[in-house]
Amino acid sequence: MNRIRLISGLAITVLLLFLGLASLLAPQKDYSENENRNLASFPKISLSGLADGSFMKGLECAITDHFPLREKLVLTRNRIKMALGHKDIGGAYIGKNGYLFEKVTEKDINTDLYKKNLKRIHSLSEEYKNIRFNVMLVPSSGAILKEMLPSHAQVYNAEALLSLAEEELKDCRVIHLTSPLEQAAESMQVFYKTDHHWTENGAYVGYWILTNGEGAYKTLKTLPGSDELLGTLYSKVLTNPDTKDTINLPVVEKDVKVKINGKDASLYCKEKLEEKDKYAVFLGGNHGLAEIFGTGKGNILILKDSFANGFVPFLTKDYAKITMIDLRFYSGSVKTYMAENSFDDVLVLYELNNFANDTNIAKLGL
């Protein structure tokens, strides 16, 4: 019996050594399109790294990320979990009707940071009292489509966070979208099933509420984009590839112009529809500074995350210039930019849970 155990142990050891060596020798990828994330790179050997253990930790992460057939093994594991009835895989809930939901519970919300971020927006609005401030914090899909969640799924209290925003932002208009999105969801798809973003329908609901139904974009008109979207939530679960989303592009005037970080660009980068991250069709993804020249009047500054990318096409008929600043990628000073440019409105547009946990808002310097 001991001899059998010894032989088995040696066989497993040889197999692991072989697979580890295969990981080292195989062509290295920097990015996993399926998982929508950067892969760990193999660390360089150093005396300090060996001494403090960081080299071995980095090596373990790299071998795990570059393990041969890793993605197929992950896909098989997740399909087995689904077959066994698991509804919580890779940080996502497996919902009804093909919906996937990002798992964001109360403990995932940094309430202290949320309050600080609200105070920073309040301070900015106090400094620019002549500018109208609107704050649109979009509840995540799980907080809207509760009936599609699996039983016993936990979701953070979006209404409590929005009520707190109203208390802190006395001089701003805080836009509540929970009820409008819930009502719209009864007759249309307002969130993608495989991605955490809102669809063009959901974004248009936000636009309609922002403009009190009086915006220049009177009727939602779209062009087909792709019906092959497998988004960020699919990347967490890596299963159900047959459930794909359709991404549509709101129709805009032909003379709308765009500059990204000072360079000519496009509102829609249709080449992105051929890539994994198809949501990047909007402006080519996230950028520090995007300037959009529309056909309306006045100027608006949008402090944003990626939820604004699919929303901004609707504003091109309302404003002459739309400036979008993403603090995750913007290296300049927002206060300096505002001092050097004239704005009629400011819109703070984030997914609610992202705003609550975003340390980059501290870059406002307030």
Image (cartoon, rainbow, N blue to C red):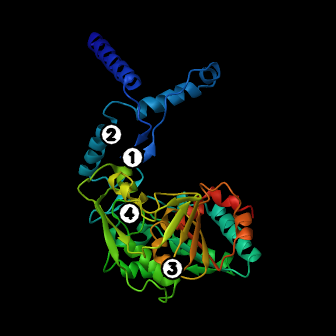
The mark nearer the N terminus, 4 or 2, is 2
- Mark 3 and mark 2: span between their CA atoms? 46 Å
Q: Residue 71 carries which label?
A: 2
Q: Are marks 2 and 1 in contact (CB under 8 Å)?
A: yes
The mark nearer the N terminus, 4 or 1, is 1
- Mark 2 and mark 1: span between their CA atoms? 9 Å
Answer whether residue 102 is visible to the viewer in this image: no
What amino acid is labelled 4 in the image?
His
The mark nearer the N terminus, 3 or 1, is 1
- Mark 4 and mark 1: span between their CA atoms? 26 Å
Nearer to us: label 4 or label 1: 1
Q: Which residue lies furthest to the top in this view?
A: 3
In the rendered view, tell whether residue 31 sits above or below residue 148. above
The mark nearer the N terminus, 3 or 4, is 4
How packed mark 2 is, by other alpha carbons closer than 10 Å (few <14, some 14-19, many 20 or more), is some
**Where residue 158 appears, x then y in whole percent?**
51, 71
> Which residue position holds label 1?
35
What amino acid is labelled 3 in the image?
Thr
Which element type, helix, strand or loop, lies under badge 2? helix
In the rendered view, tell whether residue 226 sits above or below residue 84. below
> Which residue position holds label 4?
152
> Which residue position holds label 3?
295
What amino acid is labelled 2 in the image?
Glu
Q: Do the residues labelled 4 and 2 touch (CB within 8 Å)?
A: no
**Where residue 206 appears, x then y in whole percent?**
47, 78
In the rendered view, tell whether residue 338 sits above or below residue 14. below
The mark nearer the N terminus, 2 or 1, is 1
Which element type, helix, strand or loop, lies under badge 1? loop
Answer whether residue 276 is visible to the viewer in this image: yes
How packed mark 4 is, by other alpha carbons closer than 10 Å (few <14, some 14-19, many 20 or more), is few
Is 7 positioned to the left or the right of 325 in the image?
left
Foreground residue among 213 and 313: 313
